[in-house]
Image (cartoon, coloured by chain):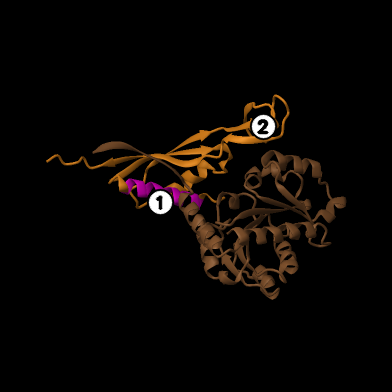
Chain colours: A brown, B orange
Amino acid sequence: MSAIRVPVVEKIFSTNDKIANQNRQNLTNKKVLAINLMASPGAGKTSFILATIKRLQNQFRIGVIEGDTAPVTIDADKIISAGMPAVQINTGGDCHLDASMMGDGLASLPLDELDLVIVENVGNLICPAAWDLGTHFNLLVASVPEGDDKPYKYPNIYRGLEILIINKVDLQPYVEFKMDYFRQGVEMLNPGLITFPVSCRTDEGMDAWIDWLSKKIIEFKKNA
Amino acid sequence: MHELSVTESLLNLALSHANQANATKVTAINIVVGRLSSIVDDSVQFYWDFVAEDSICAGAKLNFDRRPAVLHCADCSTDYTIEHDLTPCPKCGGMRTTIISGEEFFLDSIEIEKEAEKIS
């Protein structure tokens, strides 16, 4: 018997990353833009998705993948009753979606008929940041009542973002939330990050977000 | 929080390299973990004994090489190490930074045993 050192130097997420790249390629081939939407529980993920769908549904066809830790279809039901195809993925208690679950979700959606897929990740600011799903953009819905220290406490999720939504800005007069402090933390982690302060309840700021997203979808379909 | 699935990925990666090398046993797993990678080594160690059971990796020692989080200041080009909190550049107070190290999370190498090759 002999003891031997075998060099590997391979990312531990490499299998996930390979599947994620296949998902991304599949979506790009079908000219479907995909967004991985992350947030803590209660930030307003589903409300934000519904508000986005409501404003885009006359112009684009949208599918939703709902990641949930438990087999309750509350969120998926809301999307389906808004008239859009939705598929629910139950992670069986796991704290995040991974690329292989995302692949299963994509297989259940009519991709040929869609322009945009929104993936609602599990409500969590830690784990989803580590798993690439194979979407084109990572989006975080932060919200005012969560507190202005979140970028400092959960740096990993802020670093991997392409889009930041600050939801519930209508609550600013009622809670201790220093916007400057919050945005300073974001700027350190992700300089120049595209940010939309919104309120799904009052519709404040939604026009700017919808305008930006519409342009992105059109641009993506042209170049894909 | 997600260390179980991480540990399973680690095992699969180690096993595939061990099989390629015709190993009969894996004695050590050398992992590089950056401070910013949000991986709790104790937790990986805890799950390891369960997931590696019944494989040639059973009983392998997990060695963690921890790398510090080093930031580069875009304003004055200072490199500095952060411990727990995100802090501005200690030299100029700059907030615009890029990460130089600390995000690593990979399997560096495995240590294996194999039957001595027969010399004919």
User: Which residue in the protein does label 1 denote?
Assistant: B12
Answer above or below: position of A193 versus B84.
Answer: below
Give A211 or A76, whichever is nearer the viewer.
Answer: A211
Chain identity of mark 1:
B
Image quadrant occupied by the C terminus of chain B: top left
The picture places residue A13, in percent across and down from the top left corner, at: 49, 49
Residue A36 sits in which quadrant?
bottom right
Give A120 or A215, whichever is nearer the viewer.
Answer: A215
Q: Is residue B117 left or right of residue A98?
A: left
Is any part of residue B88 visible from this angle?
yes
Q: Mark 2 falls on what kind of element?
A: loop
Residue A153 - label: none
Residue at point 68%, 51% (across, down): A163
User: Which residue in the protein does label 2 denote?
Assistant: B74
Q: Is residue A66 left or right of residue A206?
A: left
Give A180 or B26, whichever is nearer the viewer.
Answer: A180
What span is colored magenta in the figure? B4-19
Q: Mark 1 falls on what kind of element?
A: helix
The picture places residue B45, in percent across and down from the top left corner, at: 47, 44
Mark 1 belongs to which amino acid?
Asn
Looking at the rendered structure, whether the residues under marks 1 and 2 are on a common chain is answered as yes
Q: Is residue B18 magenta?
A: yes
The picture places residue A45, in percent across and down from the top left corner, at: 70, 60
Q: Is residue B21 magenta?
A: no
Are there few (<14), some (14-19), or many (20+) residues within 10 Å of tag 1? some
Give B53 or A45, whichever is nearer the viewer.
Answer: A45
Label total for image? 2
Distance from the alpha carbon under mark 1 to that under mark 2: 39 Å
